[in-house]
Image (cartoon, helix red, strand yellow):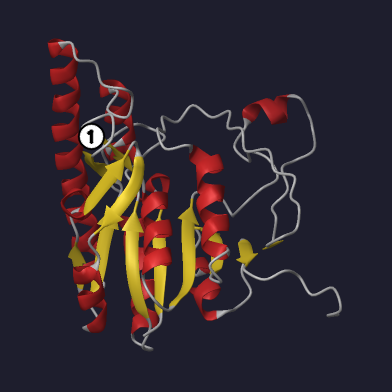
Amino acid sequence: MCVNIVKLGGSVITEKAKGEQEINFRVVRNLGLEIKSLMDQGEKFIIIHGAGSFGHVNAQKYGVNRDWSIEKSAYNRKLSGVVKIQNDMHNLNFMVVSTLMECGIKAVGVCTNNISVNRNKKLSYMYIDNIIKYLEHNIVPVIYGDVVNDIGRNPFSITSGDDIILYLSSNINNVRKAVFVMDVDGVYDRDPKSNIEIRRRQRKPQLIDNIYMGKELNIDTRSRGNVKDVTQRMEGKLKSIFEIASLGIDVYCVNGFVRERLKNALVGHSFRGTHIHPEAKDENKS
C-alpha cells in the first residue's frame, strides 16, 4: 500500500494574510478535484492542513506557545486561547472535509488534539492506527495543526502541520511522495514576498527547481513579511522537508493557487515548483 501525503498550507486554504477566519472554498475544491482524479487511478492519500487565519492570529494573541505563567489570570487567559483555537481548528477542519466530500472524496476529519502529545513543544507521539485503518479502506484522513497536550514544562503547545507530515512520513510504511502545497511556486533562495528586496532593486529571488540531498544550498530563510505565524515559517518547513527526504521519500513544493501543479507533481509530469530528491545527484547522467 503506497501512500501520498499532501499538506495544504494555511495561507493557501484560508485568508491568512488578511487575518480573517475565512476559508478559500474555491482553492480547496480545485485541489480536491485533482486529488480525486488520482484516487480514481488507485492512489491513496493522507491530507494535512495548516491553521492559517483560524489558528495563528489567536495563538499569537493568547501566547499559547510561549511559556506559561503560574499567575492565575495569565494562566486562565492562555487556557481560554487553547479552547478557542481548538474549536476554531475543528470548525476549519469540518469545512475542509465537507468541501473534499463534495469533490467525491471519502474524507474524514481526524481531531489532532485527541491523538497527539507534545513534549516541550515538539511532537512526541501520535496514535496512527485509525489513520492506517482508513487508508486500508480508501478513506482519506484529514488532519491539521492544532494546540495539543504537552507532557513537558507547559500543559499545552502547538503541533504544526509540518510537524505532523514529518511524523507520519517517519511512522507510516510505503509513503511514496510528500507534497507541500504553498502560496508561492516552491523553494526560493530568499523570501519571494519581501518588499524590502524589491525596494533595494536587488536581483529577484530565484526559484530552486531541484534540490538534491547532500548538496550544499545557499538559502536565506529570513522572512520579512507581516503575516502572523507561530510555527517557524520557512526555516522550520525546510527542516521538515529535508528530514522527510532523508527517509528516501520524494518531496515536492508547489503553488496551490495554480491549477494542475499538485496533480502534475504527483504523476511525474513537468511542473513549476521544487522537487527535493532523496538521493544525491548523479553527475554522470546527461
Three-letter amino acid code at disc 1?
Phe
Q: Is residue 284 left or right of residue 114?
A: right
User: In the displayed structure, would residue 57 be above or below residue 126?
Assistant: above
Front-most of residues 5 and 92? 5
Front-most of residues 200 and 9? 9
Q: Is residue 104 visible?
A: no
Rendered location of residue 57, percent (x, y) = 32, 29
Residue at x-position 70% and y-position 30%: 197
In which quadrant will I find the N terminus? Answer: bottom left
Q: Is residue 7 left or right of residue 185?
A: left
Rendered location of residue 76, percent (x, y) = 13, 19
Residue at x-position 33% and y-position 54%: 49
Front-most of residues 215 and 192? 215
Rendered location of residue 66, percent (x, y) = 33, 24
Q: Residues within 10 Å of mark 1 (few under 14, many from 20)?
A: many
Residue at x-position 40% and y-position 81%: 38
Residue on which disc 1 sits: 156
> How many numbered badges does the structure rendering display?
1
In which quadrant will I find the C terminus? Answer: bottom right
Q: Is residue 20 visible?
A: yes
Residue most extreme to the bottom: 41
Element on which disc 1 rests: strand
Q: In which quarter of the view is residue 4 placed?
A: bottom left
Q: Is residue 124 left or right of residue 192?
A: left
Q: In which quarter of the view is residue 277 placed?
A: bottom right
Rendered location of residue 131, percent (x, y) = 24, 69
Residue at x-position 35% and y-position 37%: 121
